Amino acid sequence: MSEQRASGKEPRTGRPERSDFGRRVAARRQELGLTRDEVAARAGAAAGYIRYVEEHPALPDVGLLLRVAGALETTVTDLCGGNADLPPGLGEAAYHPELVALDEAQCRARLSTHGVGRVSVTTEAGPAIIPVNYSVIDDAVVFRTAPDAAPATASGTKVAFEVDHIDEAMSQGWSVLVVGMAQQVTNPETIGRLVAEAHSKPWAGGDREVWIRIEPEHITGRLIQVR
């Protein structure tokens, strides 16, 4: 047995560790449902470059960094983690901001297929807003949780579910609100399909096998943009 194995450490594979920047690029690309080639085409980069960025500790020059952020419909600050430990909205309002109502199609496009949203629940301690990893399957919002976790109390009640995106640098952003009945999914066949089609597992980890489905009754949204 080698010294590494005797100490309980795994031997190095020789593959460079990814940077936080690379992980954010990969996560955002997957969130948008894009391939690496599609991102490269949008950014005007070589086809293999996005893969290199995602898998190696690399940081593009400023020009390419801006193009990659644009291709991923996000900001350089977000990709570099500049706002990782700060709540959004610290910046000043932009000049001539305009608040625009989004129609249902625009809301559904922003709700997209998966991400992180917040669900309203009523607990013994009072109302609470809980972040959850969600997917959109069959036009409904679904998420998984633990049977004793707060999000599980949503089952059998009408809830509000919200997602948003904030561009701190430009003082712009949007939010989408879904209102509908939440029900626990109990059919084994349906649960198997949800497991197969969901894009990600809960970030909180652990045994979270309770599936909650929110059937939208109303979908509304707002966009703050600069005129």
Image (tube, rainbow, N blue to C red):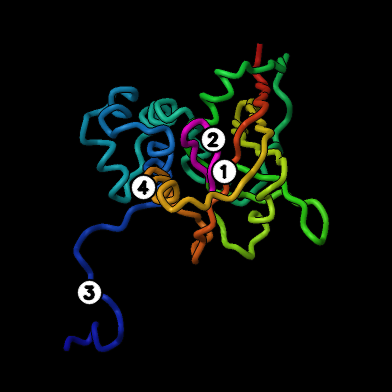
Task: Report if the CB atoms under discs 1 and 4 are less than 8 Å apart.
Answer: no
For badge 3, the amino acid type reads Pro
Q: Main secondary structure of the magenta part?
A: strand
**Going 68% across and 22% down the picture, which residue do you hit?**
222
The image quadrant where one finds the C terminus is top right
Q: Which residue is mark 2?
A: 140
Q: Position of residue 15 (x, y in %)?
A: 22, 59
Q: CA distance from mark 4 to mark 3?
A: 33 Å
**Going 71% across and 15% down the picture, which residue do you hit?**
98
Q: Which residue is mark 4?
A: 196
**Looking at the image, which is closer to me, 185 or 16?**
185
Q: Secondary structure at mark 3?
A: loop
Checking the image for residue 11, the label placed there is: 3
Q: CA distance from mark 1 to mark 4?
A: 15 Å
Q: Secondary structure at mark 1?
A: strand
Q: Which residue is mark 1?
A: 213
For badge 4, the amino acid type reads Ala
**Looking at the image, which is closer to me, 203 or 49?**
203
Task: Report if the CB atoms under discs 1 and 2 are less than 8 Å apart.
Answer: yes
Task: Report if the CB atoms under discs 4 and 3 are less than 8 Å apart.
Answer: no
Q: Nearer the viewer, mark 3 or mark 2?
A: 2
Q: Which residues are magenta?
A: 134-143
Q: Secondary structure at mark 4?
A: helix
For badge 1, the amino acid type reads Arg
Looking at the image, is mark 1 or mark 4 earlier in the sequence?
Answer: 4
**Going 50% across and 56% down the picture, which residue do you hit?**
203
Q: Position of residue 123 (x, y in %)?
A: 77, 57
